[in-house]
Amino acid sequence: MERILRIFLANGSFFTFFGLQIVCFWLIINYNSTQSEIASETWSLYGGWFRSGKDVIDNYLDLDEENEILLRENAQLRAKLPESYYDTTVDQDSIEDEARLQRFTYLATRVVNRTPYNPNNTFVLDRGEQLGVIPGQGVVGESGLLGIIDVTTSRYARAISILHLDTRISAGLKNKAFGTLRWDGQDARYMSLSDIPEYITVNPQDTVYTTGYSNVFPTGIAIGTISEIEVQPGTGNQLLRVRLINDPLRQDLAYVVQDLFKEELENLNTTE
């Protein structure tokens, strides 16, 4: 307080001059119509600019909240898609029961960290065990696949990207032919679909979808389109080069796919 008083005492003439200038400015504006109109127009011009700038800043600060709301809404909409349900329709003696059970739910999340581009890409999500995230769950983006959860903590989860040399995904075509989708560590825009029988008719630009057989992703999620077809001599199979519909390395918003039937299906697979 003493230091503040010293500043005022040492610069008293300046503060007095500044105060008188403000008083004079106020008197000129309020008692002269021309100056009053000029001041009013100036304030209107710059005041509008100031408010516009303030609105831009406020809107920017509100983006995170709006994005979070949109993510939750999208997750709810995805959970209502037909492939997210288990069809319990029973047709017996002309009696039909059209009940459906929820099988897949979607948890909105964000990518908070990722490895530099390499043959074994991984990324970290800001959702963990507290919200039901466990290893083996799939991760999808607004379009296409992103990866599979492999390590979890209470609040975070790490996923191996689909662009990882160890990733294997069950994928197929509309004609029900299916095989194994993997990345060769080369071009991040492409993956390879193997084990497609040679007798199956395949055309460039055909869409490749998830099959749902791995219990990681729901059936029917579009992954990419076929760009090249190579018949592998002596194997009876074709190797398909698939151009991805998304860029998994540049996605910031994601959804963890939670399969409500996963434990039941895994118990069947491990039963001897």
Image (cartoon, grey):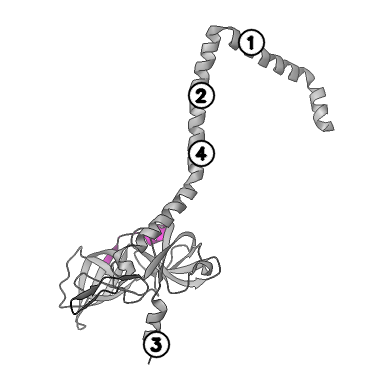
From the viewer's perspective, tell me whether residue 94 is left or right of residue 49.
left
- Mark number for residue 46? 2
The residue that label 4 is drawn on is: 57
At label 3, which amino acid type do we have?
Answer: Thr
Q: Residue at x 31, y 70 (%)?
A: 100
Q: Secondary structure at mark 2?
A: helix
Of residues 80 and 39, the one nearer the viewer is 80
Name the N-terminal-most of marks 3 and 1.
Answer: 1
Residue ranking furthest to the right: 2
Residue at 51% x, 18% y: name it: 42
- At label 2, the amino acid type is Tyr
Tell me if 234 is positioned left or right of 12 in this view.
left
Q: Earlier in the sequence, mark 4 or mark 3?
A: 4
Residue beneath disc 1: 27
Who comes first in sequence, dot 2 or dot 3?
2
Highlighted range, magenta: 242-250
- Label 3, secondary structure: give it: helix
